[in-house]
Amino acid sequence: MGPIGTVSVLGVGLIGGSFALALRRMGFAGRILGVSSDATLTRALEAGVIDEGCSISDAVPRSDLVYMSQPVLRIIEQLPDVRRLAPEHALVTDAGSTKKLILDRARELFDGGPDFLGGHPMAGSEGRGVDHAEARLFEGAVYALVPTGASPPESGAAREFLGWLGAMGCRTKVIGAAEHDRTVAWTSHMAQLVSTALAAAIGSRLRASGGLEVAGDGLRDMTRLAASPHAVWSEILDTNRDPIDEALDCFVREVEALRRSIREDGAASHFERGNALRARLEATGWPRRPGQQAENPSGRDSAGEAPTAPLS
């Protein structure tokens, strides 16, 4: 076994639970501890997501990797306790959806102690909680790495953690905290808010269910994210307000320009620019292709079969 023999998952929900399941699927043979509410830990144990439910004071001192996957403000609140409890050789990482406030606090705390590496898997679903955790959730996804310095730490635990991300099929990208938050305001947060606004607008106009009977797949696709509960998004919106406001302002202006174009010239230029962005997305390998698998540090997956080549 490598430097990581015990993992603590703080917040065993969709992301934390999926990380634990992905580790197991790719052959991790160590122990996975969970820190969450009693109800969540019961479900996680029954589903085989974790090996043991613990308090933070019991789990973190035993851990070589601490994976913080709670809401952003909860991560910030618990960072001092994690810094105090984590062994010096451990890697502490997080999966928060916004990074600047987390990294500002981590730089204050993690100086000369355990390594800290910020992170954000660009994966998820409209579901929430450990019941929606999936072993392949991260497969093919970009995993943003947000270090406290210029580059990720180079300890044994950090190198192994990056190896497991590769095993899961993640494509890692090192990015600064402020740049990350500006970028995801456009690529993630605005998509959620547009889907929510679209569903709210249609719902207020078509109050009777009969109108929805003639809806096509386009409406289903466009409103998928609208199923996400506000509880999941409230802290994201609160901790990334300025970049989100900038992105929404641009979107509102684009919609207004599109409306004018429909009246004047048929909106061809808007469709052309939209087509171009979609083509650029597809050229990057997006959308993700389910079922792909990557190489793992142990050389075999959890079913005992040799893995396929890594994702490019």
Image (tube, rainbow, N blue to C red):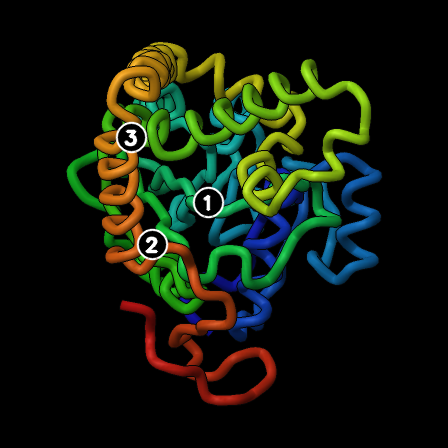
Q: Are marks 1 and 2 in contact (CB under 8 Å)?
A: no
Residue 245 visible to the viewer: yes
The image quadrant of residue 185 is top left
Crowdedness near tag 1: few (<14), some (14–19) or many (≥20) residues, C-alpha within 10 Å: some
Q: Is residue 187 above or below residue 60?
A: above
State the CA–CA distance, disc 3 to disc 1: 33 Å
Mark 1 and mark 2 lie on one chain; the one further toward the N terminus is 1
Q: Which secondary structure, mark 2?
A: helix
Q: What amino acid type is highlighted by mark number 3?
A: Thr
Q: Residue at x 44, y 79 (%)?
A: 298
Q: Which secondary structure, mark 3?
A: helix
Residue 246 visible to the viewer: no
Point out residue 26 in the picture as x, y percentages from the top left corner. 51, 72
Residue nearest the viewer, comparing 76 with 250: 250
Q: How many marks?
A: 3
Q: What amino acid type is highlighted by mark number 2?
A: Ala
Can you tell which mark lies on residue 229? none
Q: Residue at x 61, y 27 (%)?
A: 232
Relative placement, left or right, of 44 versus 259 is right
Can you tell which mark lies on residue 183? 3
Mark 3 and mark 1 lie on one chain; the one further toward the N terminus is 1
